[in-house]
Amino acid sequence: MKKTILVTMLAIVFIGCKDTPKTSTSDVAEDPMIKENLKEAALEETDNTEVAVVEKPKQKSIKALKEALTAKGFKTFDYFDKTTKDTILMQQYFIAFLKRGPIRGQNEEEAADLQEQHLAHLTKMYELGYADISGPFGDDGDIRGITIYNVPTLKMADSLANADPMVKAGRLEIEIHPWWAGKGFSLR
């Protein structure tokens, strides 16, 4: 039973990686639990079990990535991590704080319609590659949420953030700040 589950997990990982090119096989192989499961599956493998081998996609060098970003107008710098001896490419992003706006007198139906338009706008920003992550805060404070824009200039981030229907209606206001993060790092 355990062997069947592990082979099924491997098949799912293989198929999932094949369908979503953004997923790196190194991310899967670095997970300690998955590493251990892969070792166990290899030990239990019999002659009639096939194991798929997934090659790691070639990645641009830090130098090539930095050159490409610079050519598009992005600000970057190299950070050398003394502990790991790795060079990390830092990129400037723009974090937009969506704050409670002065016009909040919309009725329930208008507010719901604006919320739908707001979510459609954020989805479009993500799909077009302008925004990397968005989300609301879990309290009822004046700062309602954030969006991190992956664009080269403050002017562009400000323009995209202010195109949000909630902002146009005055229900939200935008406050934007430059923000630096390691290129390619993900949330944990």
Image (cartoon, helix red, strand yellow):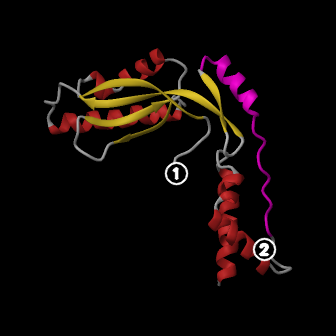
Farthest residue to the front: give it. 82
The residue labelled by disc 2 is 42
Q: Residue at x 75, y 27 (%)?
A: 64
Q: Quadrant of residue 76?
A: top right
Q: Position of residue 67 (x, y in %)?
A: 71, 22
Q: Which mark is residue 188?
A: 1
Q: Secondary structure at mark 2?
A: helix
Q: Residue at x 75, y 28 (%)?
A: 63
Residue closer to the observer: 39 or 84: 84
Q: Is residue 89 left or right of residue 133?
A: right
Q: Amino acid at mark 1?
A: Arg
Q: Residues within 10 Å of mark 1 (few under 14, many from 20)?
A: few
Farthest residue to the right: give it. 47
Q: Which residues are magenta?
A: 51-74
Q: Quadrant of residue 147?
A: top left
Farthest residue to the bottom: give it. 1
Closer to the eye: label 2 or 1: 1
Q: Which mark is residue 32?
A: none
Q: Position of residue 84 (x, y in %)?
A: 69, 46
The quarter in which the N terminus is drawn is: bottom right
Q: Amino acid at mark 2?
A: Ala
Q: Quadrant of residue 116?
A: top left
Q: Position of residue 69 (x, y in %)?
A: 65, 23
